[in-house]
Amino acid sequence: MFKIKNPYITLILIHLGIGFGIYVFRPLATVYFFGSVGLGVFYLLKNRNKNNEALFAAAYLTAAEVLIRMTGAVPIYEAGKYCVIAFILFGLFFSGTSKKSGPYWLYLLVLVPAIVYASTTLNYGTDFRRAIIFNISGPFCLGIAALYCTDRKITYKELRYLVWSLLMPVIAMGTYLLFYTPDTREVLTGTGSNFAASGGFGPNQVATVLGIGLFCLIVEIVVYSKNWLLLSINLALFVLLGFRAFVTFSRGGVLTALIISVAFIFIYFKGTSLRGKKRLSGVFIIVGAVLLGTWILTSVRTEGLIDKRYANQDAAGRIKEDVSTGRGDLITSELDAFYDNPVLGVGVGKIKEYRYEETGILAASHNEVSRMLSEHGIFGLFALSILIIYPLIFRIKNKRNYLFYSFLGFWFLTINHSSMRIAAPAFIYALALLNVVKEKNKTPIRRQRLSEAR
């Protein structure tokens, strides 16, 4: 009987099957969601988070969130994000937080004034609870994830398992998309973001998660693909996810994946031995060739429309005047709101109403930086300062996490084109705060439980 001894390959096969199964029988998405949550809860309670079960479960649900949404696995739109938050809170209950996490308690605290102020600024007919939760769930998720991850020791082996946890649901989603829209030429009408090629869901969110998968595959290819079998499998998956990311016609997620992959490659290449550099040089050439081949394949399958999209042209080849597709004006209006309301901002969830009242435009900028400033005022500026400055200070004495700049870069780039509509930027930001150590150096340290925190 044929047996696969490599757990990585086994997990890939399972998730290829999950993606195909959900396409064939969509209600399986609900089974997949509750099964994933159930397994996470089981091992978390069984081991009381001794092996960072909360971290791995949260990572898995972070990557699975968009697949859950696009397949309607549960009626609650933000169920995935809520589960990520719940797992992290359980992890904090069992394992506590580091004394070095103080800035993130302060970060969470400065989010409160704008929430209170919103009760006086939101329009009478607005669902106050829904408006607040929708807009604050992302920043809150970031805060508690940072509390959990700050200076938390994990080994390099566990870091790889964390990459697996982020990658596997994306493989399932890529497989689902492949069967959902096998012939992309049938659904292309222009160079705008394409919902039909994105599983009938938001192209921006889909491309963002596919970008996570591409980045994880780069890590696997560069660090762990030591034989031709693993290299071939990872390159094949890279073509699958790369093609599906390109045909969403959403550039943000793809460009983010490219930038953070380059950051990782630079840091890892710089720290490896001369012998390792020689091996990596060959790997980079192969990856570059595969990436070019994937682009050419996409160009052919889209009849050249993808080339025009990234050249900022419409289907007729005319240059579009606004590369930001109108978001620049929306961001400007949010900055104007900050200038007019510099202390408390306009209140959480108020900026869309404020913009409509001022300009007649009812739309979201999907830019978390300008939203934080407009809705939280000076407190938002202070919160953003913590999020940017503290990880860099933390990095000074913790330089072993070779994914640090990639994790931090993913957060910053993503919130500037997709805000925090999904858990990914919030959770992945926190991963930059992990303290990666060698196996022999992982010793238990005294941590402050959430119930003990003051």
Image: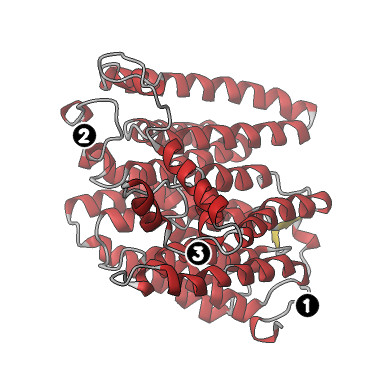
Name the outermost residue toward the bottom: 451
Q: Mark 3 points at which residue?
A: 58
Which quadrant does the C terminus fall into? bottom right
Give the SS element for disc 1. loop
Classify residue 418 as left or right of residue 433: left
Q: Are marks 2 and 3 in contact (CB under 8 Å)?
A: no
Question: Which amino acid, by three-letter code, is at mark 3?
Answer: Ala
Q: Nearer the viewer, residue 138 or 184?
A: 138
Q: Where is residue 190 in the image (x, y as percent from the top left)?
A: 24, 25
Residue drawn at (76%, 48%) of the image: 400
Give the SS element for disc 3. helix
Q: Position of residue 340 (x, y in %)?
A: 54, 53
Dot label at residue 182: 2
Q: Sequence-wise, which precedes: disc 2 or disc 3?
A: 3
Q: Nearer the viewer, residue 331 or 385?
A: 331
Q: Name the residue under label 1.
A: 446
Question: Mark 1 to mark 3: distance in Å?
Answer: 23 Å
Q: Sequence-wise, which precedes: disc 1 or disc 3?
A: 3
Q: Position of residue 429 (x, y in %)?
A: 60, 54
Question: Mark 2 to mark 3: distance in Å?
Answer: 31 Å
Instruction: Please say whether residue 100 is visible from this viewpoint.
Output: yes
Question: Mark 2 to mark 1: distance in Å?
Answer: 53 Å
Residue 104 vs 4, above or below: the answer is below
Name the outermost residue toward the right: 397
Question: Which amino acid, by three-letter code, is at mark 1?
Answer: Arg
Residue drawn at (69%, 54%) of the image: 385
